Image (cartoon, rainbow, N blue to C red):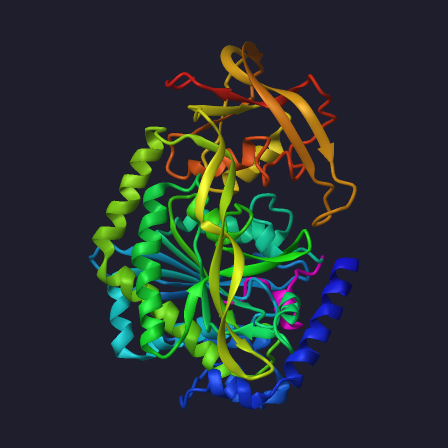
Amino acid sequence: MKKTIAYILISLMTVYQVLGQSRKMEEKFFPEPNIDIPTPAFQKAEWKGFTKYKEMVAYVTNLSKEVDYIVVDQIGESQKGKEIIRIRINKPSDQDKIKVWLQGGLHGNEPASTEGVLYILYTLINDSKYNILLDRLDITILPMANADGYNVQNRFSANGIDLNRDFIKLATPETNAIRKAFSEFSPQIAIDFHEYNPYRAHFNYFGEKGITTYYDAFFLYSNNLNVNSVIRKTTKDLLVANAKKALQENGRNVSDYSSTKMLKGHIHFNQGGSSPRSTSTNFALNNCLSVLMEIRGVNLKRISFKRRVQTTFIAGMSYLNTAYKNGDKIREAIKKANTLTARLSESVVIKQEKTTIKTDYTCIDLATEEKKTIEVIMTDGLQMKAKKTRERPFAYILLPEEEKAAQKLEILGCKVEQLPSDKTIQVEAYQVQKNAVSIVKWENIYLRRLKTEVTKTSKQFPKGSYIVYLSQEHANVVPPALEPENDNSFFTFRVIDGTFDVGSELPVYRYMIKQKI
């Protein structure tokens, strides 16, 4: 609750700052396109805000009711009982289709994401120029992933959790439902649409009156080193490259995603992302080409809203066109990634670090209302280096009491087996060397930090112990969850919990022999 209240206060201050800026300046750099968008928010007065949950449900139901290859259903419920709506578009075809996952509204205060996805849906159904894409694509759409937050334009879910920080620990019904549906669909391409805040607090330190961002769209695609290298390269060189080109051809300014933080009294820019708790990396760990789009818009209310929705639409259609035209290339890349995963050819990365660089950053000076370039210090997540690695095991074994962890691994797309009887197995065990617990909660959790040493041992495992083999297609998500030192592991988030005294043994083991148990 305290976190939510603090966020609301910061948002109100930012909104005051934004609305106090010159609309003329916004219109100069981000002019509205002269187009009609047939989605719910544009059918009502600006002061009435954005599409409400019931309006969204009625809209998608009406669009799909006369199209027999579109199914509208629900994958679960929000914390306040709203159905999480899913639209499946699978037109009959004899072609081998690429599966595409499109998602909007995961953060409830990012309205162009939902409106843009609804615009894509409308166009796929009603425009023959785009309807042809359905001959080669099987598309699942989640237009309003965080219905509770979206209905009141609040970033968080009803219990104050940031849903895009919850895709490893899976602490909310929304992320459990979304990730389970994602795993069952098993897409080759996944796009998660968001908006970002162009008037960040740290920007006030630059220039006479501060700066704001120059970019209509940011691209966030994972460079986590546990994501297969083929997946990383194909995502960047095919999906992202084509979408950047499409947006630039339509007069949009684009860049790779960056945020800011204060470090030792200096403002550092942080480029890229690599956290498995966020969709861009989490989905990519399943050997899926995954991108998180950030459109310039948080706290802008209805300023430049049509432009923001059109930007979302252009990017989304670019991804669909790329999938339509490059199906064989995408299938081949994923097949290669799955083969490398099955061969256990890449080490498990326990710790990774970003390169720190000095670089130019293009922005808008609020004093002069002109574009300018400043030099900034940036930690570059697009240049990630492995700091600590371990040999990739053939499997992880969990003791029977870790049922909750096993269930979450299944939701994350992995097959989990159980020992049919007691068995003695040669394994590597984690011996605790250091155990530290935070004194402040993060996402309602006192985070745990462990340091361990791996030792070889012969252990008697009881019947019902869980086995997760890393030769399966979606297995790259397992090491970030089970290696104790990872910042987003089940141990960090207390999914697997205990006293874990120094010298004790953790209830997860590494099986190194390359044959089934």
Q: Is residue 148 magenta?
A: yes
Q: Which residue is at a point 38% across and 33% down the rendered structure image?
A: 472
Quadrant into which the C terminus falls: top left
Q: In the depicted view, which residue is nearer to us: 112 or 208?
A: 208
Q: In the depicted view, which residue is nearer to us: 168 or 391?
A: 391
How many marks on residues?
Answer: 0
Can residue 157 be seen here? The reply is: yes
Q: Is residue 289 magenta?
A: no
Residue 400 at x, y = what percent?
Answer: 60, 24
- State whether the magenta stretch is mostly helix, strand or loop: loop
Residue 425 at x, y = what percent?
Answer: 50, 11
Q: Is residue 341 left or right of residue 380?
A: left
Residue 132 at x, y = what percent?
Answer: 24, 70
Q: Is residue 39 left or right of residue 68?
A: right
Q: Is residue 248 left or right of residue 47?
A: left
Quadrant in the rendering for residue 431: top right
Q: Which residue is at a point 33% across and 79% down the rendered structure image?
A: 126
Q: In the depicted view, which residue is nearer to us: 61 or 513?
A: 513
Q: Which residue is at a point 76% across and 70% down the rendered structure image?
A: 9
> What span is colored magenta in the figure?
143-159
Is residue 413 depicted above or below 296 in this figure? Answer: above
Residue 248 at x, y = what percent?
Answer: 34, 74
Q: In the depicted view, which residue is nearer to us: 417 or 454?
A: 454
Quadrant in the rendering for residue 118: bottom left
Quadrant in the rendering for residue 219: bottom left
Is residue 488 depicted above or below 217 in this figure? Answer: above
